[in-house]
Amino acid sequence: MTTTEAGTAQETVYVDRFCNGIIGPSAQVVGTVRSGGHIVANTAPGCWGPMITPAIQGGHEVTLPVAVEGAEPGDGIAIRIRGIEVTSAATASGNDQMMEGRFNGDPYCAKVCPQCGRADEPTVVEGIGPDSVRCADCGAPAAPFTFTNGYTMAFDDTRQLGVTVHKDQAEHYAHDAARYAALPGNSVQNPILLFAPGDLVGVISRMRPFMGQLGTMPAIDLPDSHNAGDFGNFLVGAPHSHAVTAEQLAARTDGHMDIDVVREGAILVCPVKIPGGGVYMGDMHALQGDGEIAGHTADVAGTVTLQVEVRKGLGIDGPVIFPVADDLPFLAQPITPAERAKAEALARESGAPALERSLPISVVGTGPDLNSAIENGLGRAATLLGMEVPEVMNRATISGGIEIGRAPGVIQVTFRAPIGALEKAGLADLAIEQYGEPA
């Protein structure tokens, strides 16, 4: 991670610039924030816009990283999400179809012009619709994706609801796509509103924005959308220049989670794998159901405020989340004083030993498929909390659950953990901050 712009640690670092899609040690650092300080960013839409912009090499358009003073490999960075606000007035999304001949093995990070063969080609926009993005050199249609079933969604002024609109309105947005998408000034993506999809009309959805990408830099350069165990697996043995080995993929930090609890009020703890950590973000979603089963959701621009804190010697391999209490599975919710009293009475009657005190924790796991991701998450939770995997499995079954962030392979192992185990892991204070003292 280059430090030419890092300089002296600041109380607040403002970010409105984006990387070219590749994140890791070679990425330019936009500044350094002190531990306990804030990062304020204007983020660009992820997924579809960058997906139809060949010059963006990573599949998303994420912010330049911010170093955190004092963060060293083996530490963690606690990120308190103080605010997330959607600035886009509309977006477009839907199921994707890859356009054969327009990529080399991976349409997200190895785009190729089908006519002149230029890789990561610059593009120009001519008109609207799926063929509006064209190679700047030869004029051939260049977008490596199109919709199988797509929609255009408008948001209300309070950013609480979205509705999918008819084709005429979608085309109206397409003619002024950058403005309705509220693209930040330094964004270089072609806004997906240009495609004006209108297959799904009149659907109402509630908005609850969250960050699809938020985390720290991996220890090797990776396409930003592939900094995860599922998308990253596409790079293993790939035919393009971003290929990695399975061993190298272990350097990932799983910053691309698409987990909908990574929203305002949550605390996200990320591993540090390079000096400074390098906090970056992007891919804000206006809303999403668990699993992101369509492959994509409502990508938006927005403003984000984070408070960051170095946690020395934490030693985590992947992200840990303390979600907003309302986002916890029913069984994982903190035990109330009334429940505690009933449980103690039952323990006395049944001769049970002293009851443990516990608080929720959510450990992220990723892998090529959901079974692999669950195995990864269970193993990470066991290592973090000093348990055997079968114990974590039991606890997740009777005091939590396995939640799906994204298919094919991002999950959360969420459960109530004994307060003593959280203390040994160096995380009890964060759990208490989020949920209060255990009953």
Image: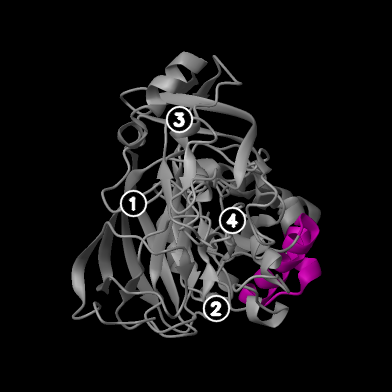
Label 1 with label 3: CB-CB less than 8 Å: no
Q: Is residue 357 in view?
A: no
**Is 94 located above or below residue 19 in the figure?**
above
Q: Is residue 220 magenta?
A: no
| Whole-percent x, y for residue 392 in the image | 73, 65
Residue tagged 2: 424
Label 3 with label 4: CB-CB less than 8 Å: no
Residue tagged 3: 128
Marks 3/2: CA distance? 57 Å
Closer-to-camera residue (177/400): 177
| Whole-percent x, y for residue 120 in the image | 51, 61
3 or 4: mark nearer the eye: 3
Rendered residue at 40%/84% (across/down): 275
Residue type marked 1: Ser
* Figure quadrant of the N terminus: bottom left
What is the crowding at mark 4: few (fewer than 14 residues within 10 Å), some, or many (at least 20)?
many
Residue tagged 1: 187
Residue tagged 4: 108
Q: Secondary structure at mark 1?
A: loop
Q: Closer to the N terminus: mark 1 or mark 3?
A: 3
Q: Closer to the N terminus: mark 4 or mark 2?
A: 4
| Whole-percent x, y for residue 52 in the image | 51, 46
Q: Closer to the N terminus: mark 3 or mark 4?
A: 4
Q: Which residues are magenta?
A: 369-395
Marks 4/2: CA distance? 41 Å
